[in-house]
Amino acid sequence: MPTKALDAIGVEVIRAAFNAAADRMRITMIKTAYNHIINESLDFGCAIFDPDVQMIAQGIGLPMFQGHLGFPIEAAIKDRGIGAFREGDIFIHNDPYTGNGNHLNDIAMTMPVFFDGTLTGFVAVKAHWSDVGGPVPSSMQIGSREFRQEGLRFISVRLYDRGELNEEVMRIIRGNIRTESGTLKDAQAMVAVCRAGEAYFKEILAKYGRAAVLDATRLYMEQSEKRTRAALAAIPAGVYRAAGHFDNDGITLDQPVRIEMAITVRDGGMTVDFTGTDAQVVGPFNCGDAITVSACRLLIKCLTTPHDPVDEGCFRPLDVIIPKRSVLAVEEPAPTARYYVPINLLIELGLKALAPAMKDRIPAAAYGDQMPTIAFGTHPETGTLFIQGDLNAGGTGGRPAFDGESAMIILGGSTARNNPVEVVESRIPTMRVLKYGLRQDSGGAGTFRGGLGVERVYELLSPAFITFSLERKATPPWGLWGGKEGAVNGVEITSPDGSVRHVRKATQHPIAAGEVVRLMTGGGGGWGPPSERDSEAVRRDVREGYVSAEAARRDYGLAIPPSLPPRADQIIE
């Protein structure tokens, strides 16, 4: 077996090998998953760890899971001891209070990697299961008051025992979920990812030797730490603050919930302190500390070395302080189904706080929340339950030299993709997408305009239910340096008789046959004073249909002649 010392090139070869292995795990997940929330929307992540649970590679996945998958492994070790991990074992874990932090639908699956009989590392994958039981299809509701109303909780449960499936665990899962959701098929896909990751890890070990591989991973994690500290040292030292609110907890609808943070940058390190953040709430808009730390890891990564591979070294300069029993460090039995609402706000507030120190890099606020809409009803051909979940794109904030991007998923989920119209209509014949385009005038005015939200119009041909969760009315997408706010999210439902109702947060909201649902996502805030925007850029916006002639006159003081009509809606499929 090779044991030769590695030079700098050898270290980079091993780094590249692990990154390629993590990417192959990612491809396996996409190719084998059943539900489109995974294989189309890409709501998953995968990573590889050394025996000390230091992340040595991560596949491109949901940014919210940035540097996250070590926490479920550490929780299992604390719960059961390192001796509980045996060759061929696979564990599942989704406890919001220890190691997971997000909703019960997000299941972490971990497999130890043994080489020559010695524990040498771990591979892990985390993906969104479309249903984990509970009172409503998809398991995600707005009105839950404790985790038991949100589905099954797994605390470091051994799913495979030395390579053999634990049928008793599967019987429990099968007996509690809506099997039509395809959850069991996605569980099988995750097992395939773990086994593929184990095989790729062992290939690298067999080629270079265990000692050389672990030495190389230690070295390149140290290199990542040094590069991150150097990037932090370039930020002016100081304490940077921001605060904002998400709309409510889904129970007390007139009470916004505060997120407050102070970011200290000094001596090549960063500390994020959430003192002042509101206590955990009754409704499901809480999250656990593990996902809060992960969001801060995403923040430090995008501000320092965004183009470098991700490993544990990138996060060693970061410390996070979270008040216990706050909305960002929830304790049992508080619910967490909508954990991403405070997390999305947290990430953007972090950017806002640092804007004075990094004026040439920080954008204005984005539309605020991917506000997944989950429709369910009876499939007309099979007579079984269908569950159709969509993540909704919107506008990102204007930037120091460019307009914001239109029709993008919010930063915490920005690798996710929208569901194509063809996929939705082919799977759900009673759901028609009548319109899918950019939402005119939704981007905040500025020297650099905010990106546009989208407008998506559904017609339901048979009765169904939709769960809505719209956010960021209390703290709209803010502009920076004189830029204006972006439009906020909204939904209107039109009945065949022409009556219209508006909904922001609701579980299982009934939709009658023939009703039309119009979903409008928010735009990004503007960057810089609108008066300094290039007049030709305004004319181009009007010509392209991004900005109406009226808005051009109101926001930019520019009269657009009738000979320059806006173009038809821009289709983004």
Image (cartoon, helix red, strand yellow):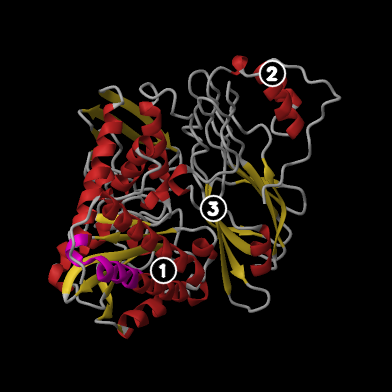
Q: Residue at x 23, y 31 (%)?
A: 268
Q: Residue at x 20, y 52 (%)?
A: 218
Dot 1 or dot 3: first in sequence order is 1
- Spot occupied by residue 149 in the image (x, y as percentages of width and height): 38, 63
The magenta span reads 197-212
Residue bearing the label numbered 3: 391
Residue bearing the label numbered 2: 535
Q: Secondary structure at mark 1?
A: loop
- Spot occupied by residue 313 in the image (x, y as percentages of width and height): 25, 46
For badge 2, the amino acid type reads Ser
Dot 2 or dot 1: first in sequence order is 1
Q: Secondary structure at mark 2?
A: helix
For badge 3, the amino acid type reads Leu
Q: Secondary structure at mark 3?
A: loop
- Residue 74: in magenta span: no
Left or right, 29 with respect to 417, comes to left
Of 17 and 427, nearer the camera is: 17
Alpha-carbon span between mark 3 and mark 2 = 35 Å
